[in-house]
Amino acid sequence: MFATFQYTSVISFYDAPQNMNQMNKQRLRFFQVIFFSIVVAIIAYPQMVKFIPPLFSVVDKLSINKGLDLQGGIHLEYSADVSQLPSEKISSALSSAQAVIERRVNAFGVGEPLVQLSQSGTEKRIIVELPGVKDIEQAKKMIKETPFLEFREPVDPNSDIFKQFDTFNAETKKTAEATLARVEKGEDFSALATELSQDPGSKDNGGDLDFAKQGTFVPEFDAVVFDTNFVSGSIYPVLVETTYGWHIIKKIEERGEGDNREVRSAHILFLKRSVDQYPELKWVATGLSGKNLKNAAVDYQNQGVGSPQVSLQFDTEGTKLFADITKKNIGKPVAIFLDKEIISQPTVQNEIVAGQAVITGNFTMQEASDLVKRLNEGALPVPITLVGQQSVDASLGADALEKSLFAGLIGLGAVAVFMILYYRFLGVVAVFALLLYTAMLLTVFKLSVFTPFAITVTLSGIAGFVLSIGMAVDANVLIFERMREELAYGKNLHKALEEGFRRAWPSIRDGNYSTLITTFILIASGTGFVKGFAIILTIGVLLSMFTAVILVHIILKFMIGSWAEKYPWLLVPKKKLLESKE
């Protein structure tokens, strides 16, 4: 008797703290699940916190990217003519054309545009989808323009362009001299500055430049305003010429001495113009363009030891043109334009007659690769012809979205009713988990925009979402049925719970793995709507496994207590209980 009592006391002494620690862990995990549920619910449905304006204003800005079929837009299909290209260059040429179109639609400001390659029989196609765009003619014009690569040389200093600037500047100087004469005759300096000055920073203040220390202005201007012979309140008697133009200067007042000396002045500025201010006029066409460039590639200086450089190879016509250009411009820069934008400005070191050249500089590997890609985009434009177009109205997308969501709600409601009626309390937990799963999926959609893998939801994606709702309870069904079997064997609730999760896991794992394998194949080989369906179904399967196997387990371990032993019929129908007792 004494021995038995001693044994029981020892067991109780060590088990009590252990059970308490276990309960504390369960309680902590349960409240973590509740906190997590509240966070994802707020993100998925911001209206829940509308009574907290600061929080609502933040979460309400999170939105789901909608595809073309949901928000409307334009679907264009182009046929790419690759008949004139060698077979080994077709793939790279199509990729270049795709890159060009992507660059154009991104510049157009389209949110989540889709540009992809496809094939119809033997015909190569480029599919372009522009969500939210309504002007189909402007979009077609923007896409159809062929990227234009050209080489330009500096303008001859003796050309008419420079003469035109000289003439313009001479006229400007005359106007400045006439204005100075008007000021000297007593006209109001402030009024003339407001009317005629071309300095946007001071003209509205009557040309007033406020107090400034020596060294603030350009040297020519500085020398005048800080000249001790220049009396406050007077006008400087001659025009002051600087790199900016011609100034009429008035010294208003000064204060301080030595290093603290400050002068308050005002001016009327007449701007000087030069060709450097107009890059498009600084360069003239040479006739050498992308059609003459056979290839551009990344190369390395000093046989692969040095930094990367870009090598160019021209055709026969381009070789002759390039030889002439380099001969005339030794020691001068030659600009490379792509779509009227300078992408490089190398300096010619010597005459190049072999039709091959290199662009050197402090390139990183990525910079050199990007430059080669852009050069080849201009060198290998693929002729494209519009073969199909479709304008999707936003109202159609909204109607389809509404119907799809309604179908999803019906599916969710039907599953919820079945689970509660058949599995009772376990079904209630499963429905909560299902709602949590839905909120988690919507949260993933919204937060994905902050990652490089933003998810765009389409109707096919919604179909995957609706399908995943039914699949989300599959794991719960397997677990709950296994729990019933364990209870029928006479095990207590906690033991049945653990065995239900442990024994159901292999079936859950294998079933979901087979689905994931299928979706991965669809993602890898599918395009457009098929890929969107597969991506969302994949995310749904992964989240459903996490919800059923981890979150439901934590909730049930915390909530199933002694009350469940008293009212087992809340978990298992009485018929099952009678069968288990027999």
Image: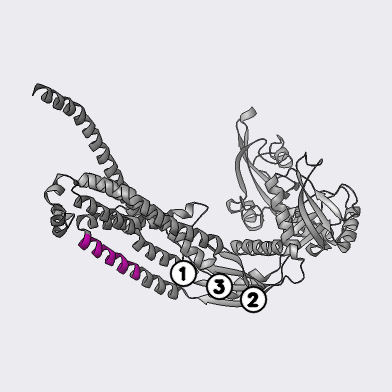
Q: Residue at x 51, y 54 (%)?
A: 453
Verify CB contact (< 8 Å) between mark 1 and mark 3.
no
The span shown in magenta is: 407-422
Q: For the residue marked with disc 1, what is the amino acid?
A: Gln
Q: Quadrant of the N terminus?
A: top left
Percent across and percent down for residue 531 are 51, 63
Q: Earlier in the sequence, mark 2 or mark 1?
A: 1
Real-space CA distance between mark 3 and mark 2, rounded to the nearest whole angstrom: 11 Å
Residue 344 to residue 377: above or below: above
Residue 6 position by quadrant: top left
- Residue 412 lies within the magenta run: yes
Mark 1 Cα-neighbour bin, 10 Å: few <14, some 14–19, many ≥20: many
Q: Which residue is mark 3?
A: 75
- Residue 539 lies within the magenta run: no
- Furthest toward the left, the residue is 1
Q: Which residue is mark 2?
A: 386
Which numbered dot is residue 71? 1
Q: For the residue marked with disc 2, what is the amino acid?
A: Leu
Which numbered dot is residue 575? none
Real-space CA distance between mark 1 and mark 3, rounded to the nearest whole angstrom: 12 Å
Percent across and percent down for residue 536 are 44, 60
- Furthest toward the front, the residue is 582
Verify CB contact (< 8 Å) between mark 3 and mark 2.
no
Q: Secondary structure at mark 1?
A: helix
Q: Secondary structure at mark 2?
A: strand
Which secondary structure is most common in the magenta stretch? helix
Percent across and percent down for residue 331 are 87, 47
Q: Residue at x 33, y 70 (%)?
A: 406
User: Relative to 119, is 154 on the left or the right?
Assistant: right
Confirm whether residue 181 shows in the render: no
Q: Secondary structure at mark 3?
A: strand
User: Relative to 91, is 158 on the left or the right?
Assistant: right
